Image (spheres, grey):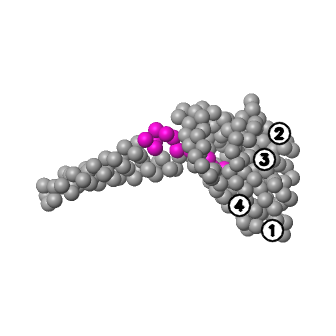
Amino acid sequence: MLSQLPTLLRKASLCLAFTTLFASAHAGLVYNNLGAAPSGSDAVYGYGPLANSFTTGAEGGTLKGVQALLVNLGPDVVGNVQVNLLASNGAAPGNTLLSLGSLSSAEIASSGFQAYRFAPTSAFNLAANTTYWLEILAADVNAIQWAFASDLAFPGVAGESSYSAAFGVSPNASAALDGYGPYQMAVEVPEPGSLALVSLGLIAVVFVRRRTASLR
């Protein structure tokens, strides 16, 4: 048993490395201010469509999902919101690239802000160093509000912009000074390089397990 100790230690180290890489890749967030204290909220039906920009990293990546911090201020008014991924047209939202689904106001809490997740039905690759917009629009009359926060210290927030049909584009930096701020959301985009490392880690773990079994 003692003679196998180095092998077991290597196996444990590789398993730990794989677990870390796996968690890192799946926690890849290019934009995430869900943890900020909301400064206020905008009505999706009254002020919308609403949108907020985000920019990918040097390797781009596959869009795994998005989250938005929402609340329903009128439980008796039942309607739907639609969530889309848009291209950027200069410094403003552009054409619709992808529908990320819809959500009924009946499914949104009225007791306080909560994060709701939307995911593409198939893999969608985002280009490297490219700006996109997450849009929420009212498909029907509803009382859904999208939270915004003036804190720009969260990942990917500084340098981006928010948009509403009522007020147009507001760069995040200046919007915060006015008492407003970017809409609260998270964009899940694991980088391709991280996913490749996860695959290598998995292969290494399988190899060491086989070597350990052969020593028994």
Q: Amino acid at mark 4?
A: Phe
Left or right, residue 196 beside residue 166: left
Q: Which disc is residue 168 wearing?
A: 2
Q: Which disc is residue 50 wearing?
A: 3
Q: Which disc is residue 75 wearing?
A: 1
Q: Is 113 in front, or is 63?
A: 63
Q: Amino acid at mark 3?
A: Leu
- Give the secondary structure at mark 1: loop
Between disc 2 and disc 4, whose residue precedes?
A: 4
Q: Position of residue 48 (x, y in %)?
A: 82, 48
Q: Residue at x 82, y 65 (%)?
A: 78
Q: Magenta segment, which residues?
A: 184-196
Q: Is 65 in front, or is 3?
A: 65
The N terminus - image quarter? bottom left
For the residues labelled 3 and 2, the Cα–Cα distance comes to 9 Å
Residue 146 among magenta residues: no
Q: Residue at x 34, y 47 (%)?
A: 203
Asked if the residue under mark 1 is in contact with the one under mark 2, i.e. CB atoms within 8 Å, the reply is no
Q: Position of residue 101 (x, y in %)?
A: 70, 54
